[in-house]
Amino acid sequence: MSILLPRFRLNSLRSRLMLLVALAITPIAVMTVLGGVRERETAIRASQENLQRLTGLAAANEAQSIERARQILVDLVSVPDLMGDAAGCNALLADVLDRNEGYVNFGLIQLNGDVTCSAVPMLHPVNLGDRRHFKRAIAERRFIAGDYIFGRVIRKHTINLTYPVIDRAGRVVAVVFAAMDLAGLDTFVSDINLPPGSILETADAVGAIISRRPDPERWFGQKVSPALLAAMRAPDHKAIVLRGEEGIERLHAFAPVGGPGLSEYTVTIGVPTETITEAARESQWVNLLGLGVTTMLALLAAWLAGDILIVQRVRKLMDTARRIAAGDLEARSGIAYGREEIGRLGAALDEMAATLQKKEAARSQAERELRAADQRKDEFLAMLAHELRNPLAPISTGAHLLKLLHSDNAQITQTCAIIARQVEHMTSLVDDLLDVSRVTRGLVSLSTQVLDLRQVVDDAAEQIRPLITARRHKVVLDLPPGPANVKGDHKRLVQVVANLLNNATKYTPEGGHIGLQLRDAGDDYVLSVSDDGIGMEASLVERVFDLFTQAERTPDRSQGGLGLGLALAKSLVELHGGSVSAASAGPGKGSTFTVRLPRFAQHAAHLVESSIDAAVRQAASVSTPLRVLVVDDNLDAAHTLNLFLAAAGHRIEVAYNAFDALAVAKVFAPQVCLLDIGLPDMDGNELARRLRRLPQTAGAMLVAATGYGRQQDRDAAREAGFDHYMVKPVNTVQLSELLAQAGAASEQRQGAPR
């Protein structure tokens, strides 16, 4: 049952409107039903009165026939021949029988019960001393209408009416009787018209039927039902409804036949209640039919009106709301505004759509402005990095050149180291600034592979070693004996660990202690960097990974940075599916930074030096002279790079714009081209494409040496035909390795058989 209930839920406006109509009509339906019930009761009450009168009339007719029989008997008692000889008595009674219809016999009963005289000849002696009516006539000395009798002499259904014969001395000497044919008694009520299915019954004192319509012969002498007999004996003779043996429910009215001195007979007429209430029932059916038609019309009107006035308009509102939700803020309901609720709702929805449209237009404009500002910011950062790296390039190259030319002068060597270290720090700041911008906008893609975290820690420690040495920090590395395999980007993970170590060195006084521990923690590897430095307030711990967040700066921490390193480390760790956290016991109690990275279950492949790397290292040691074309519009950068490469034994040609570079390339046929991207007359990418088309430089190694470090710049350079991409200031070690690789390739080509 519960499964079917959801199907009948009122889940639409029309169904609810129809329910309201049904509820409004329900009182009318109830009143109609109650009116029908009252009308039925009224019809029954009216029928009771009419039926009571009709029953009284039938009882009066039968009382007349009984009274007539009493008068005959009274007259017979006064005739002398009655008490004479038997022959005279028989003749008298036979004459009386002939003169009166409806009787089957007259007779005289002696006190001993013997019938000594009879209008109908007796074939054998008859004694009626056991008959109740005989005994009562003697005892009560009056007329007695007896109960139903099946005559012993005449063999017919009769009632015996008796009257005592009293002599002059006042003694009862005999009893005269008249046997009335019950069929004759029935004729006295034959003129009463009864509805179909009705019955008229007369019963004696014991409930035996002595008169009935219809089918009298079938029912003579049978007992009425106990309920009907009880109603007949009731003193008030109140009308009641009874169900007959044939299953028909009838309204019965009762009336006694004559007074108590005449008979103990009772007449009842029963009329079917369906006949009585037929008119009321027909009226009720007509009312119910009219109510049903009215209800159907009302429900149909509610359905149609609900569809036109409510549902269709609500559907428009729904469609409009869906279109607005889908982003179509120009959608409008199209409903005429009015004072009724749906009109007001449509007006409110359209007003909301208009407001949203204005806000969306303002938001779109703000978004466009924000994107334009973001684009300008990116362009500014790229240009800033370019402009910052351009002066750094000649400084770095010049420092390395001085160190190369004056390696025997300790003061110059120390000065060159200072310059190189500060240039590297400045370059790191620029790189961090650009990396944070890319990471926070999701523009960094990871080149993942299976790595051993121990190697990552070693590379990061090597990278940060000069700063640690300068501040005389004691660093303890606690690494597991076996591989600690994770899947990630080697360069970015080295950057994370280096940033954490760099942060520890900056905020730990000179001579302080720094510890790095790598341990297995089930499904993760946990790397923690701890120090005994200045520590952090609890408020700083909560926001230490936010951009530009730093502890209070003091004069001894000259390398305080921009507050980007930890934010960049957190973003990169999360890109690897890990997490990073910070903890500190308070100011002056040091800090601990913890990185969790998911472990990689498979064993990492052993890092074996490839044949190409071996060839590069071998070529670097050989230092084969190469023809190198340097193209840069920054004169200092081009000049210092020229001096550095010349000192390494290479043949150098320098061009300060693209067109001069193309002209030089056709004559010089360089094996390696170091090209700046931001040239005044033609960008480096287009220059690379044209160099690739020249037969003299089609196979040359093209290296981009530029201040632009964005990924999109790297992608554009690769598409233009560059083999390598280096961000200024150029790493001279990396450049030497590239030149060694180019020299090795040149020797292989020269040594190949032609």
Image (cartoon, rainbow, N blue to C red):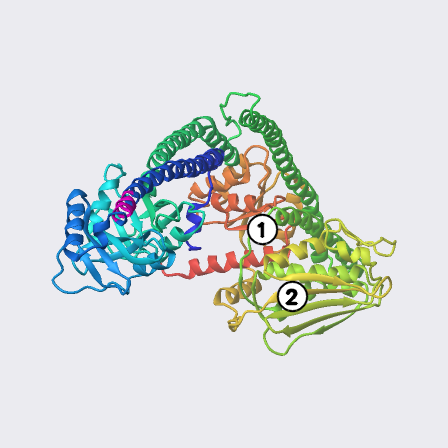
Q: Earlier in the sequence, mark 2 or mark 1?
A: 1
Residue under circle 1? 444
Amino acid carrying label 2: it is Arg
Snapshot quadrant of residue 375: top right
| Residues rendered magenta in the picture | 68-76
Question: Is residue 75 highlighted in magenta?
Answer: yes
Snapshot quadrant of residue 387: top right
Query: Alpha carbon of mark 2 to alpha carbon of mark 1: how far?
Result: 20 Å
Tell me the residue at 40%/55% (across/down): 230
Amino acid carrying label 1: it is Val
- Depicted 642 relative to depicted 323: above or below: below
Residue 219 makes an appearance in the image: no
Q: Residues within 10 Å of mark 2 (few under 14, many from 20)?
A: many
Tell me the residue at 40%/45% (across/down): 239
Tell me the residue at 37%/59% (across/down): 139
Residue under circle 2? 596
Q: Nearer the viewer, residue 119 or 179?
A: 119
Q: Nearer the viewer, residue 726 or 547?
A: 547
Classified by dominant secondary structure, the portion drawn in magenta counts as helix
Q: What kind of element bears circle 2?
A: strand
- x and y percent of residue 706 in the render? 61, 44
Tell me the residue at 68%/63% (across/down): 497
